[in-house]
Amino acid sequence: MSLAVNQPVKTTCPYCGVGCGIVAGVNSDGNVVVRGDQDHPANYGRLCSKGSALGETTGLAGRLLHPEMYDRRSSWDAALSEVAQRFTSVIKQHGRQAVAFYVSGQLLTEDYYVANKLMKGFIGSANIDTNSRLCMASSVAGHKRAFGSDTVPGNYQDFELADLIVLTGSNTAWCHPVLFQRITKAKNHRPALKVVVIDPRRTATCDIADLHLPLKPGTDTILWNGLLIYLAQHNGLNFEFIESHCENYPAALKSAKDSSPSIISVARDCGLEEEDVARFFAMFLSTEKVVSAYSQGVNQSSCGTDKVNAIINCHLLTARIGHPGMGPFSITGQPNAMGGREAGGLANQLAAHMELDNPQHRMLVQQFWNSPRIADTPGLKAVELFDAMNAGDIKAVWIMATNPVVSIPNADSVRTALDKCEFVVMSDCMRHTDTTAYADVLLPALTWGEKMGTVTNSERRISVQRQFLASPGEAQPDWWIICEVAKRMGFKDAFGFTSVADIFREHAALSACENSGTRDFDIGGLARLSDREYFELKPVQWPVTSASPMGTERCFIDHKFNTVTGKARFIEIKPRSSANPLDQQYPLVLNTGRVRDHWHTMTRTGKSARLSAHISEPMLDIHPDDARRFRLSNEALACVASRWGKVIARVNVSDQQRIGSVFVPMHWNDQYARQARIDTVVNPAVDPVSGEPEFKHTPVNVAPYQPLWYGFVLSRRELGFPGISYYVKVTGNHFSRYELAGEQTPADWAVWARGLLCAPAADVEWIDYLDKAAGNYRGARLIGNNLESCVFVAPTINLPARSWLSGLFAKDELSGAERASILSGRVAKGQPDAGRIICSCFGVGENTLKEAIKKQDLTSVEAIGQRLKAGTNCGSCIPELKALITQKKR
């Protein structure tokens, strides 16, 4: 059902797994306006910086709007027929295992459902996997080992009801900001609530921590095994629950004792202080209502599944599961990672949480679909899939809504694989990504705001993501594209859906088919929704059945699990060393992850000036001791290298980083930077159970990167810089900024700069300044006394601040002092310089904050918010605001 373009609708955010509700619409100026949905139970009106800036990311610049075949525009009929014919041909010649789909948590559940149905039920192969494999597969595997099903027991309300929250492997403040703000509000309201953060880095999340455990990377299982032993030794176990509702407890306890016999051994092996370990263990022992929330720092490991089960073991031991304010809690990374799991988007699943290796489940699904065949062996997981492509075993692949050339470990091998692959199809909303360059056929897909369907957040809550924008160009929803290909492959009757609601009804009906409570995922209560009821569906947590038509707040309240015995299972955890140990050549541990204001590979957030302002370049976080050891200077450039690849990043020396470990964000790609795809460096080791890659522990070395010159350009026009070794593009207001460094010096800087910024226009006013002896050059192009572009070059990193220069682009006309300031490289007297942006929501810079704190004697975050609004929206900047207040006190 489509809506009138200007009618505001309730929808959901397309970013993290919190699943915030949004009210979105188009104002009279044609701009997209968003605000938090105060009625949505995930966020109650709150939005983070990314969600608040969604309106800035919906423009059509760079969009893929028409089908293309072999670099030429095509009709939909020709493109769809080509995909169907080529896949059919490959299957006939090489067999069903020679084709694959690689899909994404950016898809809606209905898209996932038809893609999985086509591959597993009609092509007959399980070679469909999702980029959720890269972030949540270890949780899936851990849940299934312990509970017999992929079930998150609790909900977000449990964070507010808990007396102790353990955040492990999760920089919640930056990666799930709205959930973090709920925790912060609860802690402020009830100071007795304690928070423990377990993370090698001291992140923004530690701002509210009563205890931070900066454990040695990869030692999580040792810590949690130690907690299990401590609880058992100090009368912390619940014998009645264990005897009646669990199994394998003695073996799990023995295994834990072998690795973690005492607080002393745990502290030693984890690189922690004994008193801190003892304090954590005592807090957990003495607190009944404990939520242990974990995310990618736990999952993204070659032993990630064991980490998940080590956490769950402690909750089973104490019976802290299934009740308000307690339980293990997996925080998903993507907006529909959970929905993809429900629809069977992983290579080792069937739809509706049914098992691929269960003959009864296979028969049930095949009969329900009335399909000619059903996949009967697990397919290739994400890393395996591209390895098989490299080996020539996968001949045709369809990639949907994701960018594996940036996101898969050992990413250059993905480039090689796609280059080798006989036939590559991509459904995407963007024309140019690192992956679309390898596509034979490009299919234009609708994106957020233009399409409709359901998503499921981290607390099992299904919400409708609704359309409020007109469909641009010839773009179509993913489900329609998949169904049209399926029809052309000869499967017309099974894919004759006329609406997204049709698909949802079938998905819901399958979840209830022969279920009778034997499978947790059951939304049969929604299987008969009318189109109108589907459109108006309010957020609801599964299971949704005739017995629980309003949904289910918590699972396992009755202590009945989905294993064969109906009992939860303790898992024996034997800590394993990293698949890739450190050595003299690669002595540091590389950890990768997100920054506050960017998302995945930046195809959306990279369009927003305010989201690009906080951290605008790829960065290398490194401890001061390691910086000295490897001769790195703050804000200089460094090369980060492993056995698999290398990148160049801006150095950020920080005592918040653990000695021996470095951190580099995952977001930058070839569209926004050069030599910055960190996953080219990441090792391709995977968890043997889940297949999830080891993104948090790659052995690397670091070294100064020393070009001959450094520079930056601000320009209203899009520019290219071929041949320049370091290049980063940053979106600004009315301009783009380019950070540059080069290994070759032009013979004449003025000629180089004018050639870059002035051609081919003739009506150019050019001003410049050259200090030949010092190697400094500054130049600017003006049109009608309006700054069109400027360039600054120096032999060192000591270049003018970008912030005040950026402000000149908002001016209709430059004053004489402002013109002079460009050539002097110094801010003119009286000209504001906001400094580096701290609060993205309101564009408040560091210099503005420092001045206000000093002159107005602001001593609290609340006072800053009253004067400047900073920190009053999403709150993600609050830790940095506190740090500025602390600096002033010194």
Image (tube, rainbow, N blue to C red):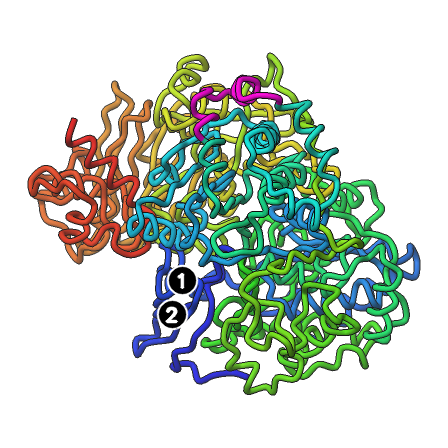
Q: Which x, y percent locates residue 851?
A: 12, 39
Q: Are marks 2 and 1 in contact (CB under 8 Å)?
A: yes
Q: Nearer the viewer, residue 837 or 617?
A: 837
Secondary structure type for disc 2? loop
Image spot of residue 12 (x, y percent): 47, 67
Q: Quadrant of residue 872?
A: bottom left
Identify which residue, 756 or 365, lies in the foreground.
Answer: 365
At label 1, the amino acid type is Asn
Which corner quadrant holds the C terminus? top left
Can residue 79 be seen by looking at this rendering?
no
Up/down of 342 relative to 795, above or below: below
Q: CA distance from mark 2 to mark 1?
A: 7 Å
Residue 43: tell me if it is visible: yes
Q: Residue 43 bears which disc, if any?
A: 1
Dot 2 crowding, Cα within 10 Å, few <14, some 14–19, many 20+: many
Is 401 placed left or right of 472 in the picture?
Answer: right
Q: Chief secondary structure of the magenta span?
A: helix
Q: Is residue 277 left or right of residue 455?
A: left
Q: Which residue is mark 2?
A: 37
> How many marks on residues?
2
Q: What percent of the width, then of the height, locates residue 174?
A: 41, 46
Give the x, y percent position of residue 72.
65, 64
Q: Quadrant of the N terminus?
A: bottom right
